[in-house]
Image (spheres, rainbow, N blue to C red):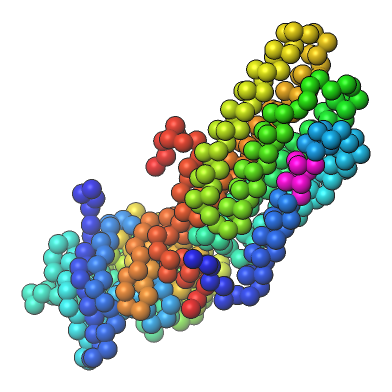
């Protein structure tokens, strides 16, 4: 159909030493889409997510066969600058991990480290713009210079999203971003994801299938390291093509 | 392929109760149609009156089934086949309820007809009643057994029932043209034939929902409507 593709994964096999975690996975991730990855624990969905910005490189003995392309560029080529890659492909984790510094400095950190701006006034602008984008500005604008550790769990998570946004990424990887949050904070994160997809390409791993159904446009179901089904979310949750998908999402586990 | 059971036993049980209530209701509706026709053919007004009384039970079951569906939707958040099952239940419960109403309508016309001398010996009407009841039964069997092929057969066979209606209509029209005193009775018989034709339509509706339930494919209204 010639629809645009942001990330192309083709024939990916992933190994932790001799243990194969992904088997021949191919997927096309579309820009300005939210793509959800679901499946039982150990199915490979997080491994897949981390392979997109080479977070797995940090694990000894981990290696990937096959191809991951970002805008047609091979992510695993020797010429790929991994630091630059991770700036383009940001990541948000399950447990919010703000740095032990003020909210302001958390957001400004990546901008400073990457030398993106030097002037204080510019930095102020970036911090405000980013906190607004993360739907956190109104809650923290009066205490920007207080420790981020004093924020609630939901606020900390949105601060981490703001921190990721500050370096102007193109893709956001989210690994269970709301699993440790209460329903209200979860709803705020989901609303935020919905807003962010206008600008970013988002890939989210979640155990919460209702969440996947609510926030995503397309969903991939993983089982035992295989991508069993990749389908439009509304189709996958009403009439999945595959029996294994059906059994999993309806709660009929083997 | 039989369904595997849910990990949640409670959820599994809720779905089973829903299915049992639908089976009970459809059995009762089927019985109302066959008894209403039998009351007419055998000229038994008490049986017709009994059919009319039974409609309350059917209405009660309809409300119970609706409530159970809402409860499952709210508490279990069904997806995929389970979601299609609940959607199917909510739709066919209405068809089954209407079939019960049709049983009542036939019984009412029957009571009126029994009070007058027979217009003619009823030959085609029992044949049509049998055909309508057969596809009703088959549509419900298709639902119970998740049998999409049988459901497709029901949709085809609905045309036979429509054909029988046309035939009966033409025949009764000739009676009315020959003898104006027959008009009142002939019209009542035409109503009954029309009611049976509607039973066929409701059965076809149920069958279409069964295809949706099994295959996740909407086949309603043929190819007349474009859908994305």
Image: B108 above or below A207: above
Q: Residue at x 64, y 64 (%)?
A: B15
Comparing A29 with A225, the one in front is A225
Residue B155, position as x, y percentages in the image: 54, 40
Comparing B207 with A70, the one in front is B207
Residue A8, position as x, y percentages in the image: 21, 64
Residue B214, position as x, y percentages in the image: 50, 55
Residue A175, position as x, y percentages in the image: 38, 75
Farthest-out residue, left: A79
Q: Residue at x 64, y 38 (%)?
A: B131
B22 vs A127, left or right, is right
Residue range highlighted in magenta: B28-35
A186 vs A79, left or right, is right
Image: A154 above or below A17: above
Comparing A231 with B107, the one in front is B107
Image: B176 above or below B65: above
**Membership of A111 in magenta stretch:** no
The reply to whether residue A240 is in sight is yes
Q: Residue at x 8, y 74 (%)?
A: A79
């Amino acid at each position: 159909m010639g629809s645009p593709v942001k990330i192309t994964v083709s024939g990916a096999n992933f190994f932790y030493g001799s243990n194969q975690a992904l088997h021949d996975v191919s997927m096309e991730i579309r820009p300005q889409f939210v793509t959800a990855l679901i499946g039982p624990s150990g199915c490979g969905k997080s491994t897949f997510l981390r392979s997109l910005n080479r977070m797995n490189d940090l694990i000894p003995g981990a290696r990937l066969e096959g191809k991951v392309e970002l805008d047609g560029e091979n992510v695993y080529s020797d010429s790929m600058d991994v630091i630059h890659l991770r700036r383009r492909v940001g990541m948000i984790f399950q447990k919010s991990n703000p740095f032990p510094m003020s909210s302001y400095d958390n957001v400004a950190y990546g901008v400073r480290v990457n030398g993106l701006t030097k002037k204080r006034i510019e930095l102020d602008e970036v911090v405000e713009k980013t906190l607004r984008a993360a739907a956190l500005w109104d809650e923290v604008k009066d205490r920007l210079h207080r420790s981020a550790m004093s924020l609630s769990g939901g606020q900390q998570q949105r601060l981490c999203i703001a921190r990721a946004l500050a370096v102007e990424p193109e893709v956001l990887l989210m690994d269970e971003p709301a699993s440790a949050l209460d329903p209200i904070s979860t709803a705020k994160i989901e609303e935020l994801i919905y807003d962010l997809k206008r600008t970013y390409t988002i890939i989210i791993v979640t155990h919460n299938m209702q969440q996947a159904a609510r926030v995503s446009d397309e969903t991939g179901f993983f089982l035992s390291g295989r991508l069993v089904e990749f389908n439009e979310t509304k189709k996958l949750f009403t009439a999945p093509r595959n029996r294994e998908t059906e059994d999993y999402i309806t709660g009929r586990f083997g | 392929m039989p369904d595997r059971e849910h990990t949640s036993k409670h959820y599994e049980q809720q779905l089973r109760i829903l299915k049992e209530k639908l089976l009970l209701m459809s059995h009762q509706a089927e019985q109302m149609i066959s008894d209403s026709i039998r009351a007419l053919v055998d000229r038994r007004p008490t049986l017709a009156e009994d059919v009319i009384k039974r409609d309350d039970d059917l209405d009660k079951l309809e409300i119970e089934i609706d409530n159970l569906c809402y409860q499952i939707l709210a508490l279990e958040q069904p997806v995929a086949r389970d979601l299609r099952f609940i959607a199917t239940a909510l739709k066919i419960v209405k068809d089954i309820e209407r079939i019960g109403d049709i049983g009542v309508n036939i019984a009412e016309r029957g009571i009126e007809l029994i009070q007058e001398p027979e217009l003619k010996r009823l030959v085609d009407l029992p044949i049509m009643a049998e055909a309508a009841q057969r596809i009703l039964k088959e549509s419900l069997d298709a639902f119970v057994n998740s049998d999409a092929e049988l459901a497709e057969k029901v949709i085809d066979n609905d045309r036979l029932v429509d054909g029988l209606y046309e035939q009966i209509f033409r025949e009764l029209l000739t009676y009315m043209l020959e003898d104006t005193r027959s008009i009142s009775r002939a019209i009542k018989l035409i109503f009954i034939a029309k009611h049976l034709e509607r039973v066929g339509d409701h059965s076809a509706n149920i069958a279409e929902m069964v295809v949706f339930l099994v295959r996740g494919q909407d086949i309603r209204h043929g190819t007349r409507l474009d859908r994305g």
